[in-house]
Image: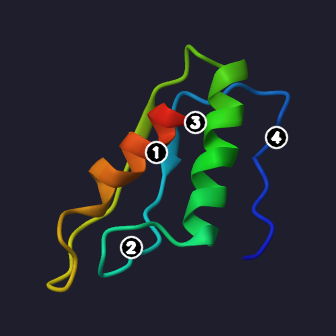
Amino acid sequence: MNNPKLADESVTPEYVILLGGGMRKDGTLPKSVKYRVETTARYLKEHQQVPVVVSGGKREYQPYPEAPALKQYLVEC
């Protein structure tokens, strides 16, 4: 899915789920994952009351779990 779209935009969701999408061996996020986080950040700026669930695990080659990296980038956006 190259162009994800929000569900019915006339309805405010109960929550947003930000799915992990991979992290490089050095702990940086790929461009596609950054785009997903940035899109989520833009949405949340308009809908601050909506809680967000950030997901993402840790593979053996990754220095730390993905979810905290996504959260950090989301907060920075």
- Give the spatial CA distance, label 3 vs label 2: 18 Å
- Give the spatial CA distance, label 4 vs label 2: 30 Å
Residue 23 badge: 2
> Circle 4 sits on which residue?
8
Q: Secondary structure at mark 4?
A: loop
Q: Which quarter of the picture shows residue 33?
A: bottom right
- Lateral position of residue 24 relative to residue 43, left or right: left
In this rendering, the answer to whether 43 lies above or below 55 is above
- Give the spatial CA distance, label 4 vs label 1: 26 Å
First in sequence: mark 4 vs mark 2: 4
Closer to the observer: label 4 or label 2?
A: 2
Proximity of marks 3 and 1: CB atoms separated by less than 8 Å:
yes
Closer to the observer: label 3 or label 4?
A: 3
Residue drawn at x 83%, y 35% as measured from the top left: 9
> Circle 3 sits on which residue?
77
Residue 47, horizontal then vertical, whole percent: 66, 20
Residue 22, horizontal then vertical, whole percent: 42, 75
- Give the spatial CA distance, label 3 vs label 1: 6 Å
Relative to the observer, which residue lies in front, 12 or 62? 62
> Circle 1 sits on which residue?
73
First in sequence: mark 4 vs mark 1: 4
Residue drawn at x 55%, y 14% as measured from the top left: 49
Under mark 2, the amino acid is Met
Residue density around tag 3, few if under 14, some if 14–19, many if 20 or more, within 10 Å: some
Residue density around tag 1, few if under 14, some if 14–19, many if 20 or more, within 10 Å: some
**Quarter of the C terminus within the rendering:** top right
Outermost residue, front direction? Answer: 26
- Give the spatial CA distance, label 2 vs label 1: 12 Å
First in sequence: mark 2 vs mark 1: 2
In this rendering, the answer to whether 12 lies above or below 72 is above
Closer to the observer: label 4 or label 1?
A: 1
Proximity of marks 4 and 2: CB atoms separated by less than 8 Å:
no
